[in-house]
Image (cartoon, rainbow, N blue to C red):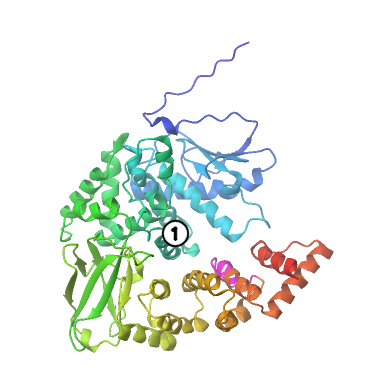
Amino acid sequence: GWVKHEFQDTLDMSTYLLAYLVSSFEYISNENDPIYEVPFRVYSRPGTQNNSECALDFGQKTMIALDNHIELPYAFPKLDKAAVPDVAAGAMENWGLVIYREVALLVTEGVTTTQTLQNIGRIICHENMHMWFGNEVGPYSWTYTWLNEGFATFFENFATDLVNPHWRMMDQYVIAVQNVFQSDAVLSVNPMTYPVCTPSQIISTFNAVAYQKSGSVILMMQHYLTPEIFRQGLVQYVSNMSRKAAQPSHLFATLQEVSDASNHSIPWPIATIMDRWTNQGGFPVLTVFRSAPTANSLTIAQERFLTDRSLTSTDRWHVPVNWVLSTDPNFNDTSPQGWIPPSFPAVAIDIPGLNQAEWYIVNKQQTGYYRVNYDVQNWAALASVLNSTHELIHVLNRAQIIDDAFNLARNGRVNYNYALEISRYLAREEDYIPWAAANAAFAYLDVVLTGSEVYHLFQRYVLELTAPLYSSLGFNNTANDEFVTAYHRTIVLNFNRRFGNEHCVETAQEMLESFRTTQVCLAADIQTTVYCSGLRG
């Protein structure tokens, strides 16, 4: 016979957000311990419910954080999350029924690595943010995919940082910015706003530009508007455009309205500033130098950064800039102290006290989406301070200096001597974030130097830099470890394994042999290093 199922009326929504789930899955819920006031369930295959506890807890906490931040309650009367063995996307933000791959939702003790745990939290938060950016307010067309994915990417870091600050997601955001620079440095890259018509064109927009670049540009917007004006603008934008299809002009007009009401001064309309950031591909590199040896001004020129320097581009941007002088190394205020217009090849900015400063840094905490190149005197001065008192420089700017120096050297704009001289300080660097930047730089050099007559010198140099950390971090977790220490340990162990540290290789092989004989599981975070060393042996 027939069975009739009746459902509540669906809210006005985009057709792509509709989903059904037919399964024998079981679930856990917040029914008996509701952290979040909306009924919240996590569905998965029978027998995996214990692996769903993290998703239930973290999912509710991030929904609370987003509810409070956006000031518009989640619209549906329930929120379900379902882990399926396989699905085309890592996750899909169907309104009220979010579908995930199992690996993106379920946590297995002893198997799930720190990296996977963070990815699970990040993806949960990303999909939760889509309940507002994507579902509550949808894009007018897929030309504006970034309105969905850019904000979800920004908030997957921002809101996760609110819930789990010890994960240091906003510090790690710098790594994401540096990573997307690589794909955004080719002449053919599409801009954030990219007209599309066909299904294949639409699918192609779901790329690093729509996600990581757009999230990075949104981060820059947050800082040049100030975090509170930015937040108030988003609150008003979501309220104004609720259950409607939005274009970037709606976002920029609302942010402008809130900015004007707050008497916040910026030299151009927000729509004018953002037009070039959203409609041009790529990003700028600023070349900064003292206007004269004893001058109190910096001359700053901009051009599009391209990996292939034989290519040229006339693209320019409205670029917010700020700076720190050695005489006052305060990196906390990330609001703009000046702007570089697109209409001039270079501008001079007066900076009182510059003539007394030994060094200067542009782009505090790398909140601006651009690279910075300096004159040789300032590169040398930065190398000197890093190799003597690196703590004077903010940890995110230490990562910025490493990433910019090595990529500018790779690009032929800076002599590798300066990049390598800067990197010498890493022997005393105990923070993960600069080492993540160095890891990317050294990985590139590892590829291009392999087989050369200097490769063994490069390997020895990296082993010397990592020796203090190899000694202090070792293979095993400790009670004093930060959350990101697992990533730091992985970088150090992998370099030492691959570059021939005999103690590292022998220790890993002993651990593998112990595992084979005792069947006592290895810590999840070191399994790759141990297994690879064992196979090598």
Front one among 504 and 373: 373
Circle 1: residue type:
Asp
Front one among 195 and 94: 195
Rendered image quadrant of residue 171: bottom left
Residue 425: image location, x then y, percent: 47, 84
258 in relation to 396, above or below: above
Q: Which residue is mark 1?
A: 161
Front one among 142 and 163: 142
* Residue displayed at 63% across by 56% down: 112
Query: Which residues are drawn in magenta?
Result: 477-489
* Residue displayed at 46% across by 61% down: 169
Please say whether residue 129 is visible from this viewpoint: yes
Please say whether residue 335 is visible from this viewpoint: no
Predominant SS of the magenta segment: loop
Please give left or right for residue 254 compared with residue 201 in the image: left
Residue 208: image location, x then y, percent: 42, 53
292 in relation to 276, above or below: below
